[in-house]
């Protein structure tokens, strides 16, 4: 095995398994730590580390306009997106949460069709969207996983994904730092500050919450494995492999999360959850293939394709 082959294997392990395992880590963290506080700590520390590393590597300091745009994206893609996810995982199984996050292409497609008019609705696109929405309904009204209808936490995650999808579309219209590490680090950092401000606003603290050893380990794992190692692997893979191959983690992560949640977290996977998850994953694959075939020569759309699914990882 050559050095490059080993590097590729390790990088794909990072974006497939490490990112897929972050959902159970979130579940462990919010078991004892208030959700907004946990999300804020995660992204503030990870953002400072990633942005600081990019500055040490010689990347230019963002301009005033870029800071404004980074703040907008931090609000959409971290404050709005992760507050709902962390809050929902207090009651929703981590595997189901990961499947709902995988519906991002559905909401992105709907926004591009209805709001931005970037796509036309044809029958294959309509069927793909309908499958995804059908999977969401199946999961949202499955009473077996937590003993009651999952509607409220599912709605929280879906609202978060609409915010993320909106952010990914807006990204293509905003001037941002050329360095993806610098841009992502600044967004994480600003989003973390806003999440901690929200935590204070809803009176999660002060006083500072008691954080168990398990929760500290889960937060450390989210910061190091999820937000630093896997993100770095993702960025490297984008320079080594086709975007469509790298973004395959979008439908691998939910499978990994479901398996880890079931075998390590003791989460129940009902027949209805399997059907709903399958519908969402088929929809995700179909939408990604549709975008890849429709925009094979459009680098801007390929960038959007990789960006719109990034919440599955960082």
Image (cartoon, helix red, strand yellow):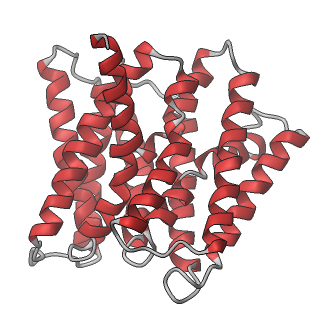
Could you say which is closer to the camera, residue 284 or residue 186?
Answer: 284
Q: Is residue 37 above or below residue 164?
A: below
Q: Which residue is farthest right?
A: 123
Could you say which is closer to the camera, residue 267 or residue 178?
Answer: 267
Residue appearing at x 16%, y 53% in the figure: 220
Q: Which residue is farthest bottom?
A: 147
Q: x and y percent of residue 303 in the render?
A: 53, 24
Q: Is residue 130 above or below residue 212?
A: above
Q: Is residue 70 above or below residue 242?
A: below
- Residue 45 left/right relative to 4: left
> Where is the N terminus found, in terms of image quarters?
top left
- Residue 127 left/right relative to 176: right
Could you say which is closer to the camera, residue 17 or residue 22?
Answer: 17
Residue appearing at x 20%, y 51% in the figure: 221
Q: Work out whether residue 167 can be spotted.
A: no
> Where is the C terminus found, in terms of image quarters?
top left
Q: x and y percent of residue 236 in the render?
A: 35, 20
Residue appearing at x 68%, y 65% in the figure: 275
Among the 4 quarters of the image, the one containing residue 38: bottom left
Among the 4 quarters of the image, the one containing residue 9: top left
- Residue 291 left/right relative to 269: right
Q: Work out whether residue 208 can be spotted.
A: yes
Q: Is residue 194 above or below residue 87?
A: above
Residue appearing at x 66%, y 73% in the figure: 272
Q: x and y percent of residue 255 in the render?
A: 51, 52
């Amino acid at each position: 095995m050559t050095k490059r082959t080993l590097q590729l294997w390790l990088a794909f392990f990072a974006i497939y398994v490490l990112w897929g395992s972050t959902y159970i880590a979130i579940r462990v963290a919010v078991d004892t730590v208030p959700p907004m506080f946990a999300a804020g700590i995660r992204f503030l520390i990870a953002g400072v580390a990633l942005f600081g590393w990019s500055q040490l590597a010689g990347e230019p300091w963002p301009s005033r306009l870029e800071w404004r745009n980074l703040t907008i994206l931090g609000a959409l893609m971290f404050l709005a997106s992760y507050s709902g996810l962390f809050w929902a995982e207090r009651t929703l199984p981590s595997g189901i949460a990961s499947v709902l996050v995988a519906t991002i292409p559905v909401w992105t497609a709907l926004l591009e069709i209805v709001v931005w008019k970037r796509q036309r609705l044809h029958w294959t696109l309509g069927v793909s969207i309908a499958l995804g929405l059908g999977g969401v309904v199946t999961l949202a009204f499955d009473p077996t996983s937590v003993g009651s209808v999952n509607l409220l936490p599912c709605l929280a995650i879906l609202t978060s994904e609409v915010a993320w999808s909106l952010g990914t579309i807006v990204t293509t219209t905003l001037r941002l730092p050329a360095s993806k590490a610098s841009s992502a680090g600044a967004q994480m950092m600003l989003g973390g500050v806003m999440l901690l401000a929200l935590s204070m606003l809803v009176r999660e603290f002060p006083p500072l919450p008691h954080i168990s050893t398990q929760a500290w380990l889960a937060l450390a794992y989210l910061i190091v494995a999820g937000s630093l190692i896997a993100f770095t692997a993702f960025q490297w893979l984008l320079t080594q492999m086709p975007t469509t191959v790298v973004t395959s983690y979008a439908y691998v992560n939910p499978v990994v999360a479901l398996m880890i949640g079931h075998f390590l977290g003791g989460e129940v996977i009902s027949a209805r959850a399997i059907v709903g998850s399958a519908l969402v994953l088929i929809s995700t694959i179909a939408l990604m293939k549709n975008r890849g075939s429709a925009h094979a020569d459009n680098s801007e759309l390929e960038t959007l394709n990789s960006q719109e699914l990034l919440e599955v990882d960082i």
